Amino acid sequence: MKAVPTVQIDNARVIVTEWRFAPGADTGHHVHGHDYVVVPMTTGTLRLEEPEGPRDVQLTAGVSYARLTGVAHNVINVNPFEFSFIEIELK
């Protein structure tokens, strides 16, 4: 099952996407082409499948984090409930 991305803004400066994950849904493996900020809308755990191996991360609603271009991973919702976040990519 795939996570559902909904692009809210795509202009010359940013791409803002809402990601919704049903339980067990994932993004598929991908590499980020832009620096980005994630704003969790839900508190819970996501599993990151990274080149170094998988790891689980705890996210808290409203507590943002930032990453640089080039991050490679698959993101999986391991919670028994829907998880969502807003991703803001900086062009």
Image (tube, rainbow, N blue to C red):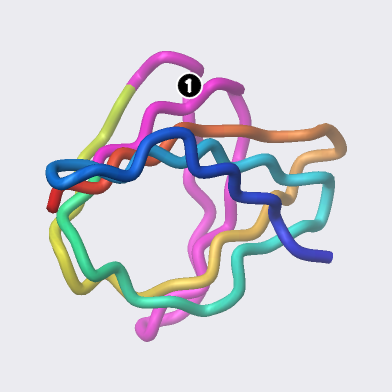
Q: Relative to 34, say whether 5 is above or below.
A: above
In the rendered image, residue 58 lying in the magenta stretch gets the answer yes
Q: Relative to 2, say whether 11 is above or below.
A: above
Identify the element where label 1 is drawn: loop
Q: Is residue 57 left or right of residue 44?
A: left
Residue at 26% of width from left, 34% of height from top? 65
Residue at 75% of width from left, 63% of height from top? 2
Instruction: List the single residue furthest toward the top.
Output: 62
Residue at label 1?
Answer: 60
Quadrant housing the N terminus = bottom right
Residue at 82% of width from left, 45% of height from top? 22
Where is residue 83 drawn, in percent x and y? Answer: 68, 34
Residue at 59% of width from left, 43% of height from top? 6
Q: Main secondary structure of the magenta part?
A: strand
Instruction: List the single residue furthest toward the front.
Output: 11
Where is residue 87 drawn, in percent x and y? Answer: 39, 40
Q: Is residue 69 left or right of residue 32?
A: left
Of 62 and 78, nearer the camera is 62
Magenta highlight range: 37-63
Q: Relative to 35, say whether 55 is above or below.
A: below
Q: Is residue 38 left or right of residue 60?
A: left
**CA neighbours of label 1 inside 10 A, class few (<14), some (14 to 19), many (20+):** some
Where is residue 28 drawn, in percent x and y? Answer: 60, 74
Q: Quadrant of residue 73?
A: bottom left
In the rendered image, residue 30 lying in the magenta stretch gets the answer no
Instruction: Residue type at mark 1: give it.
Output: Thr
Where is residue 56 drawn, in percent x and y? Answer: 53, 54
